[in-house]
């Protein structure tokens, strides 16, 4: 569905059309500023293949936010959202912020899932919703930053106990927070010449 | 005082409550131990693994840090590598002084063998010793990926150059040269680890102190009649679908079939691209290592189903860190090869 592409676009501001499948977990990070505060987003890009689910679910723990991604050109990825959402909620902090992402919005001609359907699913399950394109970078910044803002607001409201690092939030040496955000759902890919 | 007489020794980790009992077999060469003298843990003395930088190193510190808090009770075996590529000689893939920290650990400490591979990038400060695991000025270390070991094949590629070949199930291939600052002992550890990952570890089934609730003998070693026999290592598959069918039959099935289906699609995509390039450019084309089609020998993946020791979710907690047990059993067995090289 393009999770790794979304991450690459967010962290490196580039798009790679062909990626290797993500096995296990890959990591990305980026510093952002919210409310004048420097915040490091640490993003875990989990394998999207259904068969890896038992592996990836062990990494949900400690996430403050998650991006649940489907591909607007593949109805099946939308149909699987419920089970992924259940999985995420079952194995993570109950306060975790979840952003529903309909990716590949640039492929309008191949669209199989209407935007309204995504909105309705998000409304029904209390998620934030956004359509993105990792290829054109449309809404990619917004997707990650809005998720981070939502987490930040929950911190301000006292929903997240920032003294408990199990919540995925850590106050840095100069009050910079780290938000662990997980990109979820099927079909992530990542490639590159170097291994690290 | 070390002797060649078998003895048992208890190794209690100072930081953790894990207690490991070691069993040292008889060694053929006492001289081989001379080099190791002082490296074996003696109560009150520092852990030699720490001294060699293979335990409690940067990678371990990072994954155990509050930021990640991963596998907190598991030991991490790690070393630094430089990624290289094949040429007439091995060439560093990066000009920048980056190293790759490669480590194995266990998702839960009660697993008898490691099941997780960790990869991180380490950026050192100019002039800094690159293997010292507790530098005064910490290098920048960035965890890049966590891979289940069952989807990774590790091989010794070049013993002299101390190069490992790491191949993922998606046919991504990396050549990793052990950092020159590491002593040769460390490469022997990796050789031994690879052997253990490929063939298993006898101690995991024989040590009565390890409470194992399931039979560790690979399921497919049993015949229906109840007679067990060793399964011979299969020859290289002659036909790709044959390999796939073997894997399907062995039950690894879903994960692999999806991976290979995707791989085929990708390889077709890549092939199309390559064909186009080939048409445009009439120069002789050499396939990149990382685009090797998945129709190559897949027999190494037999290990996916090869035993209880690879199970992700053990049925119950066990008191020992068996990864430590692995390390413990590894030490003495390394001695002969070290002896040979003296």
Image: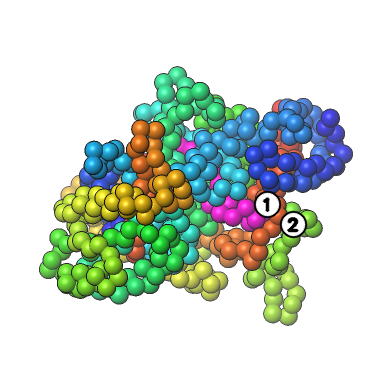
Residue A67, position in %: x, y? 31, 58
Q: Which element is circle 1 on?
A: helix
Q: Which residue is at 23% across, 42% downward?
A: A35
Residue farthest to the top, as pictured:
B127
Residue farthest to the bottom, as pictured:
B225
Residue at the spot of label 1: B322
What is the crowding at mark 2: few (fewer than 14 residues within 10 Å), some, or many (at least 20)?
A: some
Residue B56 can be seen, yes or no: yes
Q: Are marks 1 and 2 in contact (CB under 8 Å)?
A: yes
Quadrant hosting residue B340: top right
Q: Which residue is at 53% across, 43% downward?
A: B64
**Which quarter of the figure is the N terminus of chain A placed in?**
bottom left
* Label 2 chain ID: B
Residue B186, position in %: x, y? 61, 35
Q: Is A124 or B283 nearer to us in this picture? A: A124
B300 in relation to A13, above or below? below
> Are the numbered discs 1 and 2 placed on the same chain, yes or no?
yes
Q: Is A134 or B171 nearer to us in this picture? A: A134
The stretch drawn in magenta includes residue A72 = no
* Label 1 chain ID: B
The range drawn in magenta is B100-118
Quadrant hosting residue B29: top right
**Which quarter of the figure is the C terminus of chain A placed in?**
top left
The stretch drawn in magenta includes residue B104 = yes
Residue B121, position in %: x, y? 42, 37
Q: What label does residue B210 carry, if any?
A: 2
């Amino acid at each position: 569905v393009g999770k790794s592409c979304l991450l690459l676009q967010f962290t490196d501001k580039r798009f790679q059309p062909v990626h290797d499948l993500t096995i296990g977990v890959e990591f990305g990070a980026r510093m952002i500023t919210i409310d004048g505060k420097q915040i490091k987003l640490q993003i875990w890009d989990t394998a999207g293949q259904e068969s890896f689910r038992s592996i990836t679910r062990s990494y949900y723990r400690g996430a403050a936010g998650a991006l649940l991604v489907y591909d607007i050109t593949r109805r099946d990825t939308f149909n699987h959202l419920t089970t992924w959402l259940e999985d995420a909620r079952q194995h993570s902090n109950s306060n975790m912020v979840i952003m529903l992402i309909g990716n590949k919005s640039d492929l309008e001609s191949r669209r199989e899932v209407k935007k309204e359907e995504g909105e309705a699913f998000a409304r029904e399950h209390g998620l934030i919703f956004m359509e993105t394109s990792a290829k054109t970078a449309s809404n990619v910044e917004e997707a990650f930053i809005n998720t981070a803002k939502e987490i930040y607001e929950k911190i301000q409201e006292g929903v997240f106990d920032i003294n408990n690092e199990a919540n995925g939030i850590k106050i840095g040496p100069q009050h910079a927070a780290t938000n662990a955000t997980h990109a979820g759902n099927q079909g992530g890919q990542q490639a590159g010449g170097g291994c690290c | 005082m070390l002797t060649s007489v078998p003895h048992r020794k208890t190794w209690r980790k100072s930081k953790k409550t894990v207690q490991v009992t070691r069993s040292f077999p008889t060694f053929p060469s006492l001289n081989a131990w001379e080099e190791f003298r002082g490296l074996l843990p003696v109560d009150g003395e520092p852990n030699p693994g720490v001294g060699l930088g293979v335990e409690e190193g940067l990678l371990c510190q990072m994954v155990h840090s509050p930021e990640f808090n991963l596998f907190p009770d598991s030991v991490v075996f790690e070393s630094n590598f430089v990624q290289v590529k094949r040429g007439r000689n091995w060439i560093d893939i990066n000009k920048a002084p980056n190293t790759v920290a490669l480590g194995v650990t266990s998702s839960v400490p009660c697993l008898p063998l490691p099941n997780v591979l960790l990869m991180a990038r380490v950026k050192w400060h100019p002039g800094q010793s690159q293997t010292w695991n507790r530098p005064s000025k910490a290098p920048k270390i960035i965890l890049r990926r966590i891979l289940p070991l069952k989807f990774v094949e590790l091989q010794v590629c070049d013993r002299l150059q101390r190069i490992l070949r790491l191949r993922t199930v998606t046919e991504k291939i990396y050549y990793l040269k052990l950092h020159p600052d590491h002593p040769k002992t460390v490469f022997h550890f990796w050789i031994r680890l690879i052997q253990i990952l490929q063939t298993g570890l006898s101690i995991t089934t024989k040590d009565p102190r390890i409470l194992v609730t399931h039979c560790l003998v690979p399921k497919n070693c049993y015949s229906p009649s109840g007679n067990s026999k060793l399964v011979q290592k299969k020859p290289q598959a002659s036909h790709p679908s044959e390999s796939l069918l073997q894997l399907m039959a062995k039950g690894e099935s879903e994960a692999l079939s999806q991976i290979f289906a995707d791989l085929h699609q990708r390889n077709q995509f890549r092939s199309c691209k390559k064909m186009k390039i080939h048409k445009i450019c009439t120069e002789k084309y050499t396939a990149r290592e990382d685009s090797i089609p998945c129709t190559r020998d897949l027999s190494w993946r037999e290990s996916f189903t090869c035993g209880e020791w690879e199970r992700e979710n053990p049925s119950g907690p066990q008191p020992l860190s068996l990864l430590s047990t692995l390390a413990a059993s590894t030490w003495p067995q390394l001695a002969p090869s070290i002896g040979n090289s003296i």
